[in-house]
Each structure stands twice: as C-alpha cells, then as structure tokens.
Image (spheres, helix red, strand yellow):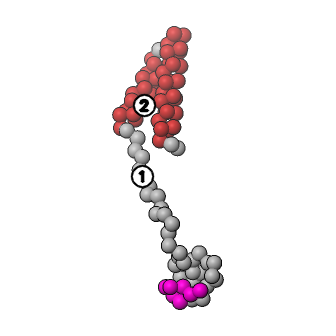
Amino acid sequence: MQCVTCQTEIADNALICFRCGTSTSDRRREPATAVEVRSPLWLWAALSLVLLVAVAVDWWLEAPLARAASAAVWSAAALTAWWARRRRGS
C-alpha cells in the first residue's frame, strides 16, 4: 500500500504513514471537545466568608463553647471545600 500524501510504501495494515504521519483510514468518530467547567463565583465567596468567620471565632473567643463553635465552623468550611471539589470533578 502507498501513502496518499508522500507516496511512501507502507504496510497494508498500517494505521499511519511512518514517514509523514498521515492517517491511512478515515476517522470513525470526531474527537471530543473540551468543555471548560467553571466554579460559580458565589461558591468561592461563600467559602471565603465561612473561612473568615471560622478564623474570627477561633481567634477572638477562647472559651470552651467557642472552641465547639469554631470546630463546627471549620467542619462546615472543610465540607464546603470538599463539595466544591467534588462538583468540579477533580
């Protein structure tokens, strides 16, 4: 068999020409197009706000009840970050 582009002799079962790289057969299907997935801006704003509240509670209040509240806010921030990454698919 000969390459249609460079006329080099290639094997009958070759998928591409070894000299020029031209495909020897037609595509069976078109390649998938990349779709850009963007995170919503409100999600990042909410995550930043939760993180800011968590830092404020942890820094200003030192009482045992404040520690429990701080742990709850940090947990909410971690869950929000996990949820955002899971939705993004990475």
State the residue in front, 22 or 64: 22
Would residue 52 be found to the left or right of residue 62 on screen? left
Residue 35 can be seen, yes or no: yes
Quick one: which residue is furthest to the left in this view?
Answer: 42
Quarter of the figure with residue 50: top left
Residue 34 position within the rendered picture, expressed as x and y whole percent measured from the top left = 44, 55
- Amino acid type at circle 1 is Val
State the residue in front, 55 or 19: 19
Report the span colored magenta: 1-7
Query: Does residue 8 sit above or below 13 in this rendering?
Result: below
- At x 59%, y 86%, the residue is 1
- At x 40%, y 35%, the residue is 44
Tag 1's secondary structure? loop
**Residue 5 magenta-highlighted:** yes
Query: Does residue 3 sit above or below 56 in this rendering?
Result: below
Residue matched to label 1: 35
Distance from the alpha carbon under mark 2 to that under mark 1: 25 Å
State the residue in front, 40 or 69: 40
Counting labels gives: 2
Question: How many residues crowd around disc 1 within 10 Å: few (fewer than 14), some, or many (20 or more)?
Answer: few
- At x 51%, y 19%, the residue is 72
- Amino acid type at circle 2 is Leu
Residue matched to label 2: 47
**Residue 82 magenta-highlighted:** no
Q: Earlier in the sequence, mark 2 or mark 1?
A: 1
Residue 59 can be seen, yes or no: no
Residue 79 position within the rendered picture, expressed as x and y whole percent measured from the top left = 51, 28
